[in-house]
Amino acid sequence: MPTPFYNLPEVRRQLGAVAIQHRLPSMCEELAYVHDGCLLSYGPDFPAMWRRSAVYVDKILKGARPADLPVEQPTKFSFFVNLKTAKAIGIDVSAAILVRADEVIE
């Protein structure tokens, strides 16, 4: 399956650059966007979701009917902060926010 256009590295970098250029705080869903200039990211922990999907695949391969399997929602979420972007757009990120972050990019 091809990568969606909005998740291509060059598109992520452009989004980050435009937000910084216009001094707009931005919030994204994935860590990759924060590495490319997004200010904050809060969303489901995708690796945990992928591991959980393997359990579903295992059950289906062992004969379970997909319609009989329960729908699950993410239970783990990740929060990331890009301090370099914060500085570029003139935002001071409080220590209370930084201690809650799973990762701070400086």
Image: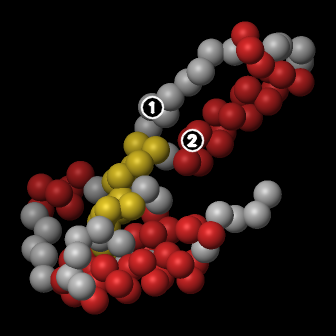
Residue located at (50% from left, 28% from top):
73
Residue 72 vertical position relative to residue 13 in the rendered view, above or below: above
Q: In whole angstroms, how far apart are the C-alphas of marks 1 and 2?
A: 9 Å
Residue 14 screen position, x and y as percent: 46, 84
Indicate the secondary structure of the residue bearing disc 1.
loop
Q: Is residue 49 left or right of residue 100?
A: right
Instruction: Indicate left or right for 51 with 104 as reference.
Output: right
Quarter of the image with the C terminus is bottom left
Callout 1–callout 2 Cβ contact below 8 Å: yes
Q: What amino acid is found at the position of numbered circle 1 in the picture?
A: Thr
Q: Nearer the viewer, residue 26 or 63?
A: 26
Note whether residue 106 is visible. Answer: no
- Find residue 13 and report its horizontal and vertical position in percent: 47, 82
Mark 2 neighbour density, 10 Å: few (under 14) some (14–19) many (20 or more): few
Label 1 vs 2, first from the N-terminus = 2
Residue 50 visible in image: yes
Quarter occupied by the N terminus: bottom right
Which image quadrant is residue 18 in?
bottom left
| Figure check: 18 above or below 96 | below
Disc assigned to residue 75:
1
96 on left or right of 38: left
The residue under label 2 is 48
